[in-house]
Amino acid sequence: MPEVLSAPLVVEFPFTRSLGPVQSAFLTGLRERTVLGVRTSDGRTLVPPVEYDPATAEELRDLVEVAGTGTVTTWAWNPSPRRGQPLEHPFAWVLVQLDGADTALLHALDAPGPDAVRTGMRVRVRWAAERGGAITDIACFEPYESEAAGQPVPHSGEFADPVTGIVAPARLDYTYSPGRAQTRYIEALADRRTVGERCPACRKVYVPPRGACPTCGVATDERVEVGPAGTVTTYCIVNIKAAHTANLDIEVPYVYAHIALDGADLALHGRIGGIPYDQVRMGLRVEPVWAESSSGRLHPDHYRPTGEPDADYDTYKELI
């Protein structure tokens, strides 16, 4: 039994979105040190503003300016800030109802310790030194003893050079363990072998193995070597180049296909190379081209034609 593998992985991509008139005004206002809310038909002021009333679904456009001071309605202490959070030292996450607002805004409170934070305490916005039209233009909140400010005042929502779109980086750091079955599969790849597992009930061979049959739900343990050649069952032509992904730095267009390896009852996916993209077809017989990953392990970099005649449709139609 090999040692079960694990590795740190990161999923990261830039999330780009356009802004409607309400969110555009809100974020542009933060850039100008102005906090805007939106008023509902029943007189409530929502901060952050939304485009539709959460109670009635009515479209909202009546913008108002609220104060940069407010009251903590609830909080939680964060002793170990993570990458990308508002402050690098311990702080409190707080919901702050700004003066003039009827809802609370989530942000960070810079406080010396949890004993310095309480529900009902007064705080104010600490503006970032450099602002560009994002929620991070509020660097954090800080304790501030003051009386509650007055009512919100109408605001046109108009600013010079309004923010019309934002790019928010999304990132997930985690440790992945493939488990027993896929550890065996990865270890076999180091010997240029592709190994699946057979279900003891339906006798189907699954590659990559999952440790259990997805059809019958019973555990699998019998190892079966398949391939190395296989058949393209279906495919797609990729015309958009992957961004910021070193291991997918491939010129477009290229083909990504489902490939039924000989002896397997489940098609795996892989890139097709060694043939013009417009000549790839269902039934094409292919074989792996092996490469070494950054960790030193071998893996099929892509699949190329074997030169054999195309497979008959009836031999792979159940695997499409």
Image (cartoon, helix red, strand yellow):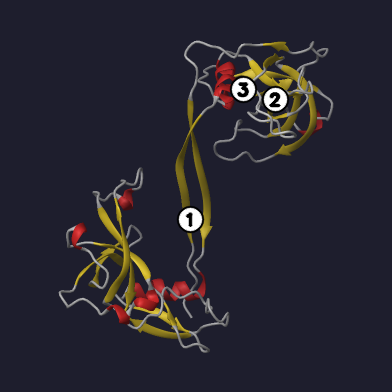
**Mark earlier in primary sequence (3, 2):** 2
- Dot label at residue 138: 3
Q: Quadrant of the C terminus?
A: bottom left
Q: State the residue in front, 314 or 106.
A: 314
Q: Amino acid at mark 1?
A: Pro
Residue sitting at 69 percent across and 23 percent down?
141
Q: Quadrant of residue 204?
A: bottom left
Q: Amino acid at mark 3?
A: Ile
- Dot label at residue 145: none
Residue sitting at 55 percent across and 18 percent down?
28
Q: Judging from the image, what secondary structure is the residue with disc 1 in?
A: strand
Q: State the residue in front, 278 or 254.
A: 278
Q: Residues within 10 Å of mark 1 (few under 14, many from 20)?
A: few
Query: Which residue is identified by label 2?
Result: 47
Front disc: 3 or 2: 2
State left or right for residue 138 relative to residue 189.
right
**Mark earlier in primary sequence (2, 1):** 1
Q: State the residue in front, 81 or 241.
A: 241
State whether residue 286 appears in this view.
Answer: no
